[in-house]
Amino acid sequence: MQTANDNITAITSTEFDSALKPENDELDSASKAEKDVVEAEKCLSIITLLSEDEKEKAARTSYKYLVASTSATSKDGDNSEKPPPPSTEERDKYAMAMARRHLRAENGNEKKALQKMRNTIEYRDKMKIDVIRQCFTKNESDVTPPPEEEEEEEYQYHIDNLAPNLLEGKLFVRGYSKDDRALYISRAHLFEARGYDTEWFLKYNIYTLERAIACTERATNGEIEKVIAIFDLGQYSNKVRTPLTLSKDITFCLRDHYPERLEKVFMVCERERVRV
């Protein structure tokens, strides 16, 4: 006698999951697409509240845009044909990328993201971050136009203060992860506890981080925005430990002004335990 159960074919849980997967993938894709649309609308809403100057400064957080915009407006005195300046659409695209990073850091809160974005724009002006990024390429006209006479002293001042520690290999960018994220490396033990300069220690880190971000942008054509930080704590001890105030400065700088920029942070140490 045939029962109802005779027509039921047993399948494994794996087969069951496989049968549902296409539909689930479609739902996940649709859900992600909807979230992307909402996020894009929020980012557009944020940048419409920015001034033209703020939009330009926001767009310049992209090194690609920074080079394109400054090269197009350079006054180097030669007769070479300069590339056209980036369009308003290009500028807004890069400004929206900055808005998106702050929006994600604030869990979708537009008001908070806008305020944090404006705070970061002011911070970048105060810290002269574009000077930090371009001072070493000031004589490469295809990368950075020659500075105006009044800017030359500022550029040289930053070179004189940044170069010594950078040349000693205390901070540098070298290599990439498998997915082309640049590696931002800090050798903390090379800094002496009594030799820390509050302003310049922060600027060493900003220069190196900005360089890693630029390398990642170039390697991935802007598809990836986050880098990987590696802190080499070999031979680390109380004698060379970073002062607490400076550690806080760097932490707050990363949290408030570089959201969505670090994929992972690794701490490498020969000792089993180290107090950081």
Image (spheres, helix red, strand yellow):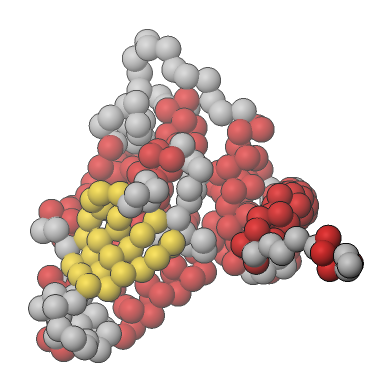
From the image, which quarter does the C terminus lie in? bottom left
Residue 28 appearing in the image: no
From the image, which quarter does the N terminus lie in? bottom right
In this view, 36 is above or below 5: above
Q: Residue 5, image x and y in percent?
A: 84, 68
Q: Is residue 188 left or right of residue 143?
A: left
What residue lies at 25% left-to-right and 69% top-to-bottom?
Answer: 231
Q: Nearer the viewer, residue 9 or 197?
A: 9
In this view, 260 is above or below 225: below
Q: Residue 183, image x and y in percent?
A: 30, 55
Q: Nearer the viewer, residue 103 or 142?
A: 103
What residue lies at 29% left-to-right and 36% top-to-bottom?
Answer: 138
What residue lies at 51% left-to-right and 43% top-to-bottom?
Answer: 223
Residue 162 image-quadrant placement: bottom left
What residue lies at 24% left-to-right and 80% top-to-bottom?
Answer: 242
Q: Is residue 106 left or right of residue 244?
A: right
Residue found farthest to the front: 1
Q: Residue 8, image x and y in percent?
A: 80, 63
Q: Nearer the viewer, residue 10 or 95?
A: 10
